[in-house]
Image: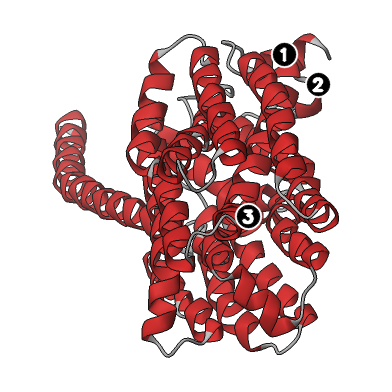
Amino acid sequence: MMGLMAGKETETATSTTARTTAPERSSGTATRAWAVRLVVVGIVLSAVNLRPAITSLGALLEEVRDGLGMSGSVAGLLTSVPPLCFAVFGVMAPRLARRFGPAAVVCAGMAAVTAGLLIRPYAGSTAGFLAGSALALMGIAVSNVLMPVIVKRWFPDRVGSMTGLYSMALAAGTSVAAAVTVPLTDALGGSWQTGLAVWAGLAAVAVLPWVPLVRDRGTAPAPEAEAPGRAGRQQPALRITRSRTAWALAVFFGLQATAAYITMGWMAQIFRDAGVSASTAGLLLAVTMVMGVPLAFVIPRVATRLPHQGPIVIALGICGLAGYAGLYLAPAGGAWAWAVLLGISNCAFPLALTMVGMRARTGAGVAQLSAFAQSTGYLISIPGPLLVGVLYQHSGGWGLPIALMVGLMIPQMAVGVLAGRDRIVEDEAAATA
């Protein structure tokens, strides 16, 4: 009798558990699907806002210089502020993400971008302009570092396609800002302050998808983030600086960032000095940026299918060298061709992001590699735009600055080939311990 009663109780408990578990599992699946869609929207909107703060300034740099009374050297310093902020603030991103969660950090980052873009045009001085720019760029910096982390953890089996989507959205935001800033400024009354401040509205929209995810301290449910049986196991610390691949990737990231920020900050001015109108120069910069829209989606997908990404690095570098040669020999005559070639070359950025996701095995490894490669890389890139401004001011032309760009492309190709080898940073760091 006791055994029969126990059997009935077990059967009742089991049936009750089955009845309650099924709806809970269904509810959890629905919640996860909703969260995944929200993450995708957040990634796209955030990526769109990672460069307008820079390219909108590039399109109006001459007006900003005149309005604030900047010299060429100070303007060069202004174009060096983005990589400086990315280097300084980007290294903080993994620590902030561990404490507050990646979604909360990106949400705060987009809010900082909004505030910075509103403040800087109306600060009334060069120092105030730089401070507002730094606030916006701080938000961009932490988002830069955490995007590959979020992609790796939420979409571990789709790193290539999601990195491509993120890079494509980034390129779209970059090119749209470059293309429409000048005509939008004219339509709004011709004030460069209004032309720069209007981009704060787009940044404000990017805050919204992250708000419901702010309390989520992890970036993915535990079954996908950790393998079974490993959730409670302490992972050994990764000494990222012991990995040769990490260093190669950091230098590659730095040199491609140097080329990108020189292009975004100065290319429109090169064309304007060659006799091209301001609006056309803005369109040429937009063409350079818009080349990244389709290629930023294609290149990461191709890269994840190759055992070695070196051939892609070489092809992009050759396009860059050809574009620089054209800027030197016939900047106005072949302007559209040089804009296209330099746009192709700038797709080293999505390739570098893809390699960050491929060169580390775990989510924590990607976070460390992303922070190290981007912070070190942006630190390396700081002198480039500033040096271009100094060379331009003291030589009175673009010959020496373009020679500098060519000189930096060669080592970029070399370290890119090293970074593209099929290596895992965790294995390299462990082997040298």
Q: Position of residue 177 (x, y in %)?
A: 43, 64
Identify which residue is drawn at 41% across, 28% down.
Answer: 300
Please indicate whether residue 81 sits to the left or right of residue 176 in the image.
right
Report which residue position mark 3 lands on.
266
Identify which residue is drawn at 50% across, 30% down.
Answer: 351
Q: Which label number is shown at residue 428?
A: 1
Q: Are marks 3 and 1 in contact (CB under 8 Å)?
A: no
Identify which residue is drawn at 21% across, 35% down.
Answer: 6
Residue in front for this viewpoint, 299 or 21: 299
**Helix, strand or loop at mark 1:** helix
Please indicate whether residue 104 sits to the left or right of residue 289 in the image.
right
Identify which residue is drawn at 51% across, 57% down.
Answer: 50
Residue type at mark 2?
Arg
**Helix, strand or loop at mark 2:** helix
Mark 2 or mark 3: which comes first in sequence? 2
Image depth: mark 2 or mark 3 in front: 3
Residue 205 picture quarter: bottom left
Residue 185 picture quarter: bottom left
Please indicate whether residue 301 sits to the left or right of residue 225 in the image.
left
Q: Local crowd at mark 3 within 10 Å, few (<14), some, or many (≥20)?
A: many
| Residue 339 is at least partly visible in this image | yes
Q: Which label number is shown at residue 180?
A: none
Q: Which label number is shown at residue 242?
A: 2
Q: Is residue 233 above or below residue 121?
A: above
Please indicate whether residue 231 sits to the left or right of residue 5 in the image.
right
